[in-house]
Image: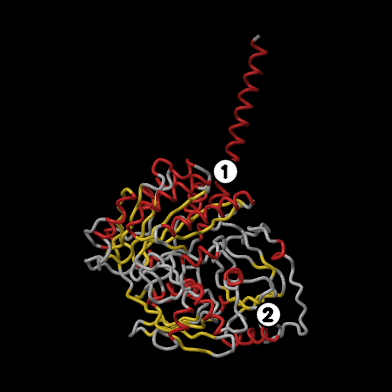
């Protein structure tokens, strides 16, 4: 009996060890996939909404081939955006380095009846930077910068990224006044969508623009400001590249400062009153934003507000440091896509782990008695988004809604209901502050509002595409019913009726576009769907 029992026990132990080893291998692979940067850019042939025509290779036959005067980096082939859902065949992509490159490309397009778009980092997710069979201007090599330090004015070619500006300004003791929350975007892309970030004053980028030069479809270059060519100024800012190619811009910059970072947690229903009592109108608060919990037990209920208050001690500025623990941030956000355990882990890490891992200046280093994390303005506005690049066969989709402060409880309750009802995989909600906009024609803020930046995860399949499409239209209706609006740079799921209800001057915008661009040389998928 013993001789038979011992081998049986050994087999069971061996099987158990093999199972444990297999689980460890699977766990190690998951950890690797979730935390390690991708070896190459992600690609996808999946298109949503389905459109076989846009992935057909271009059939345009030109009488003259590309010339040396037009520096093509790609002829034929495809382009996509950060959604990875918008693969589109194009005539070609021109690598821009000078104004002459742009002028030559536009002449080439006019001669051969091509449509033109300008593209930067291509994070607009609705085809705003390209069109089927079009000519795309890759502006990222067009990035010269000049500083008037005395007057705190930065002249920037529009292919420059905010990361370039931050690295340029930091040694000068200066900082941008407003920018997107991620620094990989080009200045031209930011101007074209009138973006905003965590600098709640002034909120949007448009108020920081003193003037810009724009190249029109007829070849003219116009200087635009609130007092010079004002109509074009108001239409081109937040104009999605449809008025012309913005060449360079004069931006206001401000002093870099040291801030004391504090975080307060509260119920979402108390957020607006806390903000208005403690942040709004407080000249000592340099940056501010909020975040809603994704944890199952406090889902869209517990809310954090992060504030950055000017220090009143002699704390020296410290140079920008590259982000640490990018692999950990990548793991946490990818793990949070998998379900309740991942979401709970992420909120716990944000609440208790982030303060210990942040790029703070210690109290001893600062020789300060103030409690909390000390950071520079540039450091806190420096986010390269490296942790969002991953190896997973999925995509992360942004959406954004703007709602008056006092309507926050209704919007969050509606958001919770829509997300749960549709089964959408919502992984993040950030709350930012935008200001009443009297500058841009396509203004999304008719009054001071909270901006809800939503981050959804979606697999490359039609079922999840349909879920997100319905979720988008439901949330647009929710925002519109609360006197709010939604952001245009994302997927083109909204109807013309929803567009006109949110942007009451959109028909005026399209009519003005055709005045400045009568041949409709400049186009994109947004204009092709809604502007015709």
- Point 42% across, 70% down: residue: 179
Q: Dot 1 surroundings within 10 Å: few (below 14), some, or many (20 or more)?
A: few
Establish if 203 lies above or below 26. Answer: below
Q: Where residue 395 appears, x then y in whole percent?
A: 58, 55
**Of all residues shown, which one is farthest toward the bottom?**
220
Establish if 208 lies above or below 78. Answer: below
- Point 36% across, 63% down: residue: 449
Disc 1 secondary structure class: helix
Q: Dot 2 surroundings within 10 Å: few (below 14), some, or many (20 or more)?
A: some
Relative to residue 116, is residue 296 drawn left or right? left
- Point 69% across, 82% down: residue: 113
- In the rendered structure, find residue 28 and report the number of the disc placed on it: 1
Q: Mark 2 or mark 1: which is in front? A: 2
Image quadrant in which you'd find residue 94: bottom right
Q: Where residue 162 appears, x then y in whole percent?
A: 46, 72
Q: Earlier in the sequence, mark 2 or mark 1?
A: 1
Image quadrant in which you'd find residue 76: bottom right
**What residue is disc 2 on?**
114
**Of all residues shown, which one is farthest toward the top?**
1
Q: Is residue 40 visible?
A: no
Q: Tally the numbered discs.
A: 2
């Amino acid at each position: 009996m013993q001789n038979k029992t011992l081998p049986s026990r050994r087999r069971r132990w061996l099987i158990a060890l093999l199972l444990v080893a297999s689980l460890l291998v699977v766990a190690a692979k998951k950890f690797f996939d979730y935390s390690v940067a991708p070896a190459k850019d992600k690609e996808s042939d999946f298109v949503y909404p389905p459109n076989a025509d846009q992935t057909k290779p271009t059939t345009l036959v030109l009488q003259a081939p590309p010339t040396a005067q037009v520096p093509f980096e790609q002829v034929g082939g495809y382009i996509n955006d950060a959604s990875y859902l918008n693969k589109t065949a194009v005539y070609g992509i021109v690598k821009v380095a000078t104004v002459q490159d742009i002028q030559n490309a536009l002449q080439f397009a006019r001669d051969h009846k091509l449509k033109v778009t300008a593209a930067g980092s291509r994070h607009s997710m609705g085809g705003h930077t390209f069109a089927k069979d079009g000519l795309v201007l890759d502006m990222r090599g067009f990035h010269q910068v000049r500083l008037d330090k005395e007057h705190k004015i930065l002249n920037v070619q529009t292919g420059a990224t905010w990361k370039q500006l931050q690295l340029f300004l930091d040694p000068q003791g200066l900082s941008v006044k407003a920018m997107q929350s991620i620094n990989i975007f080009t200045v031209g892309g930011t101007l074209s969508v009138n973006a905003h970030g965590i600098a709640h004053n002034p909120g949007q980028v448009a108020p920081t623009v003193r003037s810009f030069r724009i190249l029109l479809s007829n070849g003219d270059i116009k200087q635009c400001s609130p007092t010079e060519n004002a109509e074009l100024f108001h239409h081109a800012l937040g104009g999605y590249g449809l008025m012309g190619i913005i060449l360079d811009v004069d931006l206001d910059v401000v002093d870099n400062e040291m801030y004391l970072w504090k975080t307060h947690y509260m119920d979402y229903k108390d957020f607006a009153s806390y903000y208005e009592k403690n942040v709004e109108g407080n000249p000592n608060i340099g940056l501010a934003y909020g975040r809603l919990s994704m944890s199952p037990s406090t889902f869209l209920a517990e809310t954090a507000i992060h504030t950055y208050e000017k220090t009143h001690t002699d704390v020296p500025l410290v140079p920008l440091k590259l982000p640490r623990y990018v692999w950990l941030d990548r793991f946490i956000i990818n793990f949070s896509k998998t379900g309740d355990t991942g979401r709970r882990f992420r909120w716990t890490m944000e609440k208790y782990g982030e303060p210990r891992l942040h790029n703070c200046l210690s109290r001893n280093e600062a020789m300060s008695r103030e409690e909390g994390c000390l950071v520079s303005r540039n450091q806190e506005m420096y986010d390269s988004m490296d942790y969002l690049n991953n190896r997973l066969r999925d995509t992360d989709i942004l959406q954004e809604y703007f709602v008056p402060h006092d309507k926050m409880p209704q919007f969050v309750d509606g958001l919770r209901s829509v997300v749960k009802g549709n089964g959408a995989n919502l992984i993040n909600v950030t709350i930012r502050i935008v200001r009443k906009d009297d500058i841009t024609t396509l203004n999304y803020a008719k009054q001071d509002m909270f901006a809800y930046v939503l981050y959804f995860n979606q697999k490359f399949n039609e079922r999840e595409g349909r879920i997100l499409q319905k979720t988008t239209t439901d949330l647009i209706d929710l925002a519109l019913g609360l006197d709010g609006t939604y952001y245009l740079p994302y997927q083109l799921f909204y109807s013309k009726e929803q567009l006109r209800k949110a942007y009451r001057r959109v028909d005026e915008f399209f009519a003005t576009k055709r005045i400045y661009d009568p041949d409709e040389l400049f186009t994109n998928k947004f204009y092709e769907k809604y502007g015709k």
